[in-house]
Image (cartoon, grey):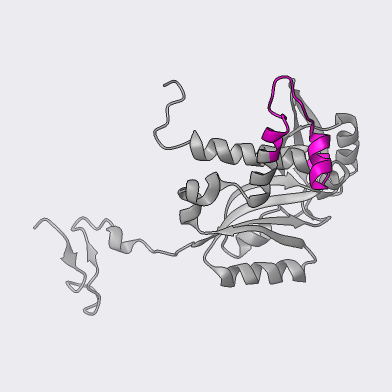
Amino acid sequence: MDGPVPLSMGGDPDDRSERRTDGSPTASDLGTDHYDLVVEAYLAHPSILLCPTLDAASEATVRPQSQTTYRGRRTLFFTAANVDYDAFERALVDDPTVDDPTLVGVESNHRTYRIGLDDSARWPTQIPEALGASVMAAENNSGGWHVRMRLPGRKTLSELSARCRENDVDFHVRQLYSPDAENGRSRATRYGLTDDQQRLLRAAYEMGYYDVPRRSSQNELADRFGVSPSAVSQQLRRGTGALVESTLVTPGFDPES
């Protein structure tokens, strides 16, 4: 007979879940766990991968590319941009979390490196993932890492904060919101912008930063907001990225249309 049959036929008489007659699982076999909190947080510690380099070259934009095993050891490829490469590479050679740093590619706007991961080095997402976090992205920020992750709830966030404190990891929550707000970024969430990003982007527009030629600089924006030029640069990139993601990178969007 086609269709599902109760497991009480040859199984636990108290179990009324359903399976197909061919033994394959049905949707009722799928476990559920609601990750109802999105957290963007800053993590830093001298033992976390690349933190010593990022601390010495905080203006750099570092993007991890891929992890692999090379010659029997864990290896990471990453790109670096917006930095004095000589100073960056000196810091990389001195970084105790890194083994055998190697330059593998030079492009007009970035360089690509391969590094071995020292056995004592911790991955920036190691503590969140040990607590069940679903890490969505990690990028460098102010000498450490800006990590975006989903958590089951505030209890896990409290555990994460406590675990970081126990390990002397610098941990600061930058943003906290629900997955619905993240997936449905619209006017209600100001296109995914933080209040600081919204103020900065508006000021940059009003001061002529986006004009051709420009009528203001990042240094002038930094003076206006009392922050460093590198902080302005990172906030401008993140804010612009959030605008592009929420207005152009949408399901079914065709860039050719």
Whether residue 248 is visible here, answered yes or no, is yes
Residue 71 colored in magenta in the image:
no
Q: Residue at x 87, y 45 (%)?
A: 95
Residue farthest toward the bottom in the current orientation of the protein: 14
Q: Is residue 51 left or right of residue 3?
A: right
Residue 66 shows in the view:
no
Quick check: 22 above or below 233? below
Q: Which residue is at 23% across, 73% downward? A: 11
Q: Position of residue 162 (x, y in %)?
A: 70, 72
Front residue of 167 and 138: 138
Is 206 rendered above or below residue 182? Answer: above
How far across and down, in percent of the image, does residue 51 sit? 81, 49
Image quarter for residue 85? top right
Q: Quadrant of residue 21?
A: bottom left
Count of marks, rendered view: 0
Is residue 216 toward the left or the right of residue 186 in the image? right
Tell me where residue 206 appears, x and y as whole percent: 69, 34
* x, y percent for residue 205: 67, 33
Q: Is residue 154 left or right of residue 79?
A: left
| 213 drawn magenta | yes
Quadrant location, the N terminus: bottom left
Name which residue lies at 44% across and 20% down: 256
Using residue 132 as the reference point, say whether residue 67 is left or right of it. Answer: right
Furthest residue to the front?
206
State which region is magenta: 203-230
